[in-house]
Structures are given as C-alpha cells and as structure tokens.
Image: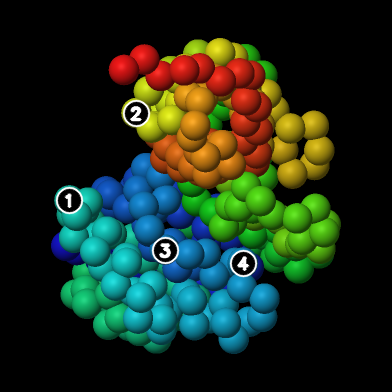
Amino acid sequence: MEVVAFVGPSGTGKSHHAIGVAFDNKCDAIIDDGLLIKGTKILAGTSAKNEQNRIQAVKRAIFTDKEHAAEVRKALAASNIKRLLIIATSDNMIGKIVKKLELDPPVKTVYINQVASKAEIKKARYSRLQEGKHIVPVPTVELKPHFTGYFADLPYNIFSSQRRQEKEADRSIVRPSFSFYGKLLIADTAIEDIINLIAEKLEGVQKVSGIKVRRRSDNSKGIVISVEVVLFYGVKLFAVTRQLQAKIKEKVEYMTAMQVKNVNVSIRSLAVKHR
C-alpha cells in the first residue's frame, strides 16, 4: 500500500481539500484525525475532533491507543486499499502515524499551500477559531426530496441527552456537500427497504406496519426514523425494540452514509406465533 502525505498547520483547511487531493493523487482512502474514510463511508476509527482537550485529540490522531490503531490496521488490511492519503499537521506527525499503523513511508507529500490560496487558508482559520467548525472529509448524501445536507456529531449515539447536545453545539463537525461522485440522492423508499430487511431477520418481530423518514427541524439536522412494529407475544419488548433501534441506525448509516439522529420504535400490537 502506497502512502501520500497531506501536511499543513491545524485549521488551514486540510480536511476541506482532502477529497480533492485524494482524487488528484489516485488515493483510495483517507486517514484524517483518527478516522479511516473510503468513498462516502467511515470504515474505522474514532474522530480526534470529539476529544475534550488538545492533548487527547493529538493522541487520538496519532493512534497512541493500541485498540484504536489495531482497529484501523485491520480495516486497512480488509479494504483492498492501494493508495492511502494521510492528513497531518507536520512531517513528524506523518512519521508517527505510519509507524503506529505499520505502513511504509510516504511516496509523496502535498503541502496545504500547494493546493489552497492564502485567502482560502485565512477563511479556514476563521471557521475553526471563530465559528468552531471542523470538517470531516466525507461528502453528504441527500435524502430525496426532503434532505439537503447536515451537520454530523461524532460519535453517534441514539440515546444521547439533550444537555450534552447543547453543551457541544459550539463544536460543529461538518461534512462537505461536494463530491467527485456527483450529487448523491437516496429515495426514502430505499431506507424503508433496508428497515424491512432488518426487521425480517430480527427474532421477535412479526412485521413492520409503518415507517416514516424525516429531516430534523433543529440546528443539528440529520434524519429521524419512526417505525411501527408488530411483535410476537411473549418476547422481551424492551430488549427487542432496543436491538431494532441499534440495527436500523447501524445499517442505514453504513449503507447510505447519512446520519441517523434518532430511531423511534412504537409497538402497534402483539401477534401470536403459530406453531
């Protein structure tokens, strides 16, 4: 696997330009702030942009945590990646990352001032320092016809409290709307099909009787999925509904690259299982 390095000081717009640099250098995937990203998917890792202080963020970004590094190494080995773009703030940081991930030294290094003008770098610094915005280089996918883009809060958590959302509202993580794949639109019927397939395979669910997919109205945006189900009599209702929530969130996000902010499951009725 060949490595291409993309280097520039923090807050200069590296993540914003990452997709373009990866495209120009024929890179299959990107390592950015602890995440392994391929196409529209985050394959592995945890974002350093969500750490509570700078020291923890740096440790996350250079893979000092053994489990974190092992997870990303495993994903790299399983993903048939031939050329990898690694984003870092210095050449020294690139060296630490390739060592932790057991990769070869870069065959090429691209510096931010080679792809961004002084005005673009100044604007990126303003967005980081004044607006508190961080970029994750995964393009947005739109839910047709209602969904037009969103802010992403990583890591995702269905059961996160409102208090935490308000506390971290000033630390926005933004997915850029552009993509070299063109405009990506997903019909809500496609999401409905995914949910029906999940329900068919989940023990305890008799059928899905209703599905609604809608965009959130608050500033965090994202999509909300509401599902009505018929469960079999005798199953543990809370356990089955929690499992269904988790599966829907996991599979919809993985297959569509859209963020699922909430999954609401309502039990419409109970059915007797025929023997």
The spot of residue 107 in percent (x, y) is: 22, 69
In front: label 3 or label 1:
3
- The residue where tag 1 is placed is 80
The spot of residue 47 in percent (x, y) is: 52, 64
- Mark 2 residue type: Lys
Q: Quadrant of the N terminus?
A: bottom left
Q: Earlier in the sequence, mark 1 or mark 4?
A: 4
Q: Are marks 3 and 1 in contact (CB under 8 Å)?
A: no
Q: Which mark is residue 201?
A: 2
Q: Residues within 10 Å of mark 1 (few under 14, many from 20)?
A: few
- Mark 3 residue type: Gly
Q: CA distance from mark 4 to mark 2?
A: 34 Å
Q: Is residue 166 left or right of residue 202?
A: right
Q: Earlier in the sequence, mark 3 or mark 4?
A: 3
The answer to whether any part of residue 97 appears in the image is no
Is residue 266 positioned above or below 75 on the image?
above
Is residue 39 positioned above or below 57 on the image?
above
In front: label 1 or label 4:
4
Where is residue 6, by image quadrant?
bottom left
In front: label 4 or label 2:
2
- Mark 4 residue type: Asn
The spot of residue 29 in percent (x, y) is: 32, 53
Q: CA distance from mark 3 to mark 4?
A: 12 Å
Q: Nearer the viewer, residue 92 or 53?
A: 53
- The residue where tag 3 is placed is 45
Q: Earlier in the sequence, mark 4 or mark 2?
A: 4
Residue at the image position 48 percent from the left and 34 percent from the top: 235
